[in-house]
Image (cartoon, rainbow, N blue to C red):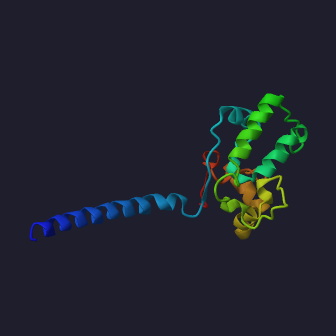
Amino acid sequence: MTETRPKVLRIASVAVAAAAILAAGVVLVRPLYADGLRVAPVKDPVVRKECGACHLIYPAGLLPARSWTAMMAGLGDHFGDNAALDDATAARISAYLTANAADAGRWPSRVLRRLPDEVTPARITDLPWWKRKHERKDRVAPATLARKGAKFKGDCKACHEDAERGLFDDD
């Protein structure tokens, strides 16, 4: 009986040490993303090349699939520009965006909170989640945008330098 007690104590000590290491890791990593949003960055080279030629490479997880589908169907007038692509390239980009959209996972992303199913936002800035996060505290007031060097409300990189990597920290 005395031999099993030290073995149990060793196992308990290892478990406590492992829990302490895990807790330390959470404490060190959590502040990096505690108040922000993390979504998968765009990994497809064709999407990166074609979309990134004109603007920030917005992660697909920032809009629902229906928004990406509508956007890809209207590339001839893409926010005032002609962004038309050949059929094969457009199909590849559309497939990637819809497969990685905010509603493509097992559970919808928090960016879709309070977005009615019948609404198809054309812009990330049209999402109720985006408005709640940005329209308070004058984060998108004209003076704030000018100070940050943002050209428009959806110019994420002006405030979130890691936006193309899918990291949107509140600081």
The quadrant of the picture occupied by the C terminus is bottom right
Position of the N terminus by quadrant: bottom left
Q: Position of residue 158 (x, y in %)?
A: 68, 51
* Residue nearer the viewer, 43 or 163: 43
Q: Is residue 149 at least partly visible in the picture?
A: no
When the figure is inspected, residue 159 is found, relative to residue 91, above or below; the finding is below
> Compared with residue 77, is residue 34 higher up or lower down, i.e. above or below?
below
Query: Is residue 123 left or right of 111 when viewed as pictured?
Result: right
Residue pictured at 70% horizontal, 53% vertical: 62
How many numbered badges does the structure rendering display?
Answer: 0
Does residue 150 lie above or below 50 as drawn? Answer: below
Q: Position of residue 96 (x, y in %)?
A: 71, 40
Determine whether, in the image, residue 111 is placed left or right of residue 35: right
Quadrant in which residue 87 is drawn = top right
Q: Residue at x 74, y 37 (%)?
A: 93
Q: Is residue 136 left or right of residue 31?
A: right
The residue sitting at 64% across, 49% down in the picture is 163
Can residue 112 be spotted in the picture? Answer: yes
Image x and y of residue 77, in percent: 90, 41
Extreme left residue here? Answer: 2
Q: Residue at x 62, y 52 (%)?
A: 39
Task: In the rendered view, tell whether residue 57 sits above or below residue 138.
Answer: above
Give percent across and percent down for residue 9: 19, 68
User: In the image shown, does 163 or 64 lie closer to the viewer?
Assistant: 64
